[in-house]
């Protein structure tokens, strides 16, 4: 089965959100067949930092939507898929 690289940007609602805790929550909620390949924290605006994560996911219908909805269900953040690349 083919795999995709999924780049997701995660922006906290306020500067007090701990991005390390958010990353841990994301890892705990991901399906078993999804792998966190890489992540980085980048400056955003007005003292906020954002988190970018790269996930390796199997090519399965509806999985990207499921992942985005799961991550967006974590309180204190909003997430958006920036790109999907077939590997």
Image (cartoon, helix red, strand yellow):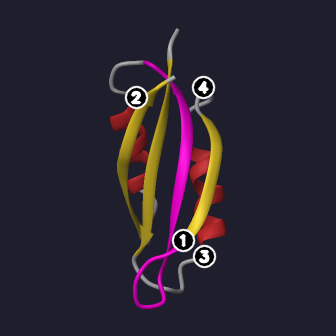
Q: Position of residue 62 (x, y in %)?
A: 33, 26
Q: Which residue is mark 2?
A: 63
Q: Which residue is mark 1?
A: 42
**CB atoms of marks 4 and 2 within 8 Å:** no
In the image as oriented, which residue stretches furthest toward the top? 1
Q: Which residue is mark 3?
A: 18
**Residue in the foreground of this view, choosing between 42 and 1:** 42
Q: Which residue is mark 4?
A: 33
Binning the other alpha carbons within 10 Å of mark 4 as few (below 14), some (14 to 19) or many (20 upward) gives few
> Magenta includes 16?
no
Q: Earlier in the sequence, mark 3 or mark 2?
A: 3
Please indicate, yes or no, whether residue 49 appears anywhere in the rendered image: yes
Q: Earlier in the sequence, mark 2 or mark 1?
A: 1
Helix, strand, or loop for circle 1?
A: strand
Q: Earlier in the sequence, mark 3 or mark 1?
A: 3
Binning the other alpha carbons within 10 Å of mark 2 as few (below 14), some (14 to 19) or many (20 upward) gives some
The span shown in magenta is: 42-59
């Amino acid at each position: 089965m083919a795999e995709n690289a999924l780049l997701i940007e995660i922006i906290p609602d306020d500067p007090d959100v701990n991005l390390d805790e958010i990353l841990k929550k994301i890892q705990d909620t991901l399906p078993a067949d999804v792998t966190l390949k890489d992540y980085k924290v980048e400056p955003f605006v007005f003292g906020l930092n954002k988190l970018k994560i790269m996930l390796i996911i199997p090519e399965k219908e509806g999985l990207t939507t499921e992942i985005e909805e799961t991550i967006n269900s974590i309180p204190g953040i909003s997430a958006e898929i920036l790109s999907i690349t077939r590997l």
